[in-house]
Amino acid sequence: MTQYMRAILFFGFMAALFIIEGSTNFWIFSGSWNTSLVILNMALVSAVMALGVNLQWGYAGLFNTGIMGFVALGGLAVVVTSLPPVTESWSAGGYRIILGLILGALTIAGTILMRMKLPQGRLRGVLTLAILIGGFFLYRAVFDSGVQAVEAIDPSVTGNIGGLGLPVLVAWPVGGLLAAGAAWIIGKTALGLRSDYLAIATLGIAEIIVAILKNEEWLSRGAKNVNGLPRPVPYEVDLQQSAEFVANAASFGLDPVTASTLYVKIGYALLFTAVLVTILVLSQLARHSPWGRMMRAIRDNETAARAMGKNVTRRHLEIFILGSAVCGFAGAMMTTLDGQLTPASYHPLRFTFLIWVMVIVGGSGNNLGSVLGGFLIWWLWVKVEPLGQWLAQVLTYGLPEGHWVAVRITEAAAHMRLFTMGLVLLFVLRFNPRGMLPEN
């Protein structure tokens, strides 16, 4: 079977699963178009994340386990871009926070410049300590007082400085830019490491980013979460109050509540599809360009590429930044879809392991394979939980209530997701190690 026919077959199968999910109430299928669209929207976001990881791994062989951090930065971009500024917080301490951050950056920059100018010796060491220690205490004195003032302003509702009040769609490319900036800093320090050390470094840095989001309440409200984020589609309540919309819904035999819910989710699906198609087309063009062929040549044999005069480190930095920017873009999309920023929800299981499974199962190095993996793995991630409950009922049928076997099997059903992901990964690696749509 040709690669083209395989792609049509697999994507047709995924389309059938979503159609059955919306139209058939049987076995693990809900028979609800609302549920089908919920799964579809997150599958679209997951496919965008998988494309970003495929750029790094499939094109350049970079093993990035810090996906969670870049996704979190994309979510933060929605807060700092689309929320209106909290005037009281800015007046109380917002400007002091900015001044403190500037002082911290100047301390680091001054230390670097001083060490570049002075020769190695005792004087340079003493001045380094003096600048770092003095700058640190000055930074903390200004920054901490501003943070305390901001977080004291109505902490149950705000307690943060807000954002710029721009349209929420602007936050999506801003999320990509934030992630790209972080990737540049990480890449300049970590891309020279061996692949396993790179994985450890990126995972650690991702945890640092998430820890900042969880603890800096003046910025992201931490564990209190940021709710009520703007959205690019209408609110269901507004649609239900529109006489024209209600009349149109009735003409399709739908009540206003169902129609408004479907309308909003279809709106998100169209936006996410446009983003996915755009990134997919650009990724395909890059893959077949001279730059893309050079990246794959570097991936296959770095030594030969260096011998041909290629700057391997610079090319790795380029692809690392691009892939991270795509992940940040997807993180902003996901936070917009959720309507809130919840820093506690960013954990490696969902935003690192799952995305890697999507890329490997779909076919690393193949952009269509990554998209396919995003759809399939997310659909399984959602649907295997009811499958586990169904299996538990079947296996414990006839056993008395409270029997230890029934209790144990019922408790194990909660782990069906992890078991299924591992099983799918093992089967693919055993019978088709290059993925469902291998690189060609």
Image (tube, rainbow, N blue to C red):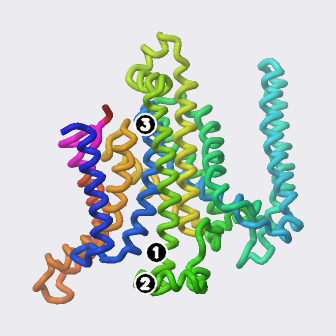
Q: Is residue 345 inside the magenta stretch?
A: no
CA distance for labels 2 and 3? 46 Å
Of 15 and 404, nearer the camera is 15
- x then y, percent, for residue 286: 49, 32
* Mark toward the viewer: 2 or 3: 2
Within the image, what quadrant is residue 13 found in? bottom left
Mark count: 3
- x then y, percent, for residue 46: 44, 55
Are discs 1 and 2 less than 8 Å apart at CB? Answer: yes
Of 24 and 335, nearer the camera is 24
Binning the other alpha carbons within 10 Å of mark 1 as few (below 14), some (14 to 19) or many (20 upward) gives: some
Q: Earlier in the sequence, mark 1 or mark 2?
A: 2
Of 350 and 79, nearer the camera is 79
Q: Indicate which disc residue 254 carries.
A: 2
Q: Residue at x 12, y 85 (%)?
A: 399
Q: Secondary structure at mark 2?
A: loop
The type of residue carrying mark 1 is Leu
CA distance for labels 1 and 2? 10 Å
Q: Which residue is mark 3?
A: 57
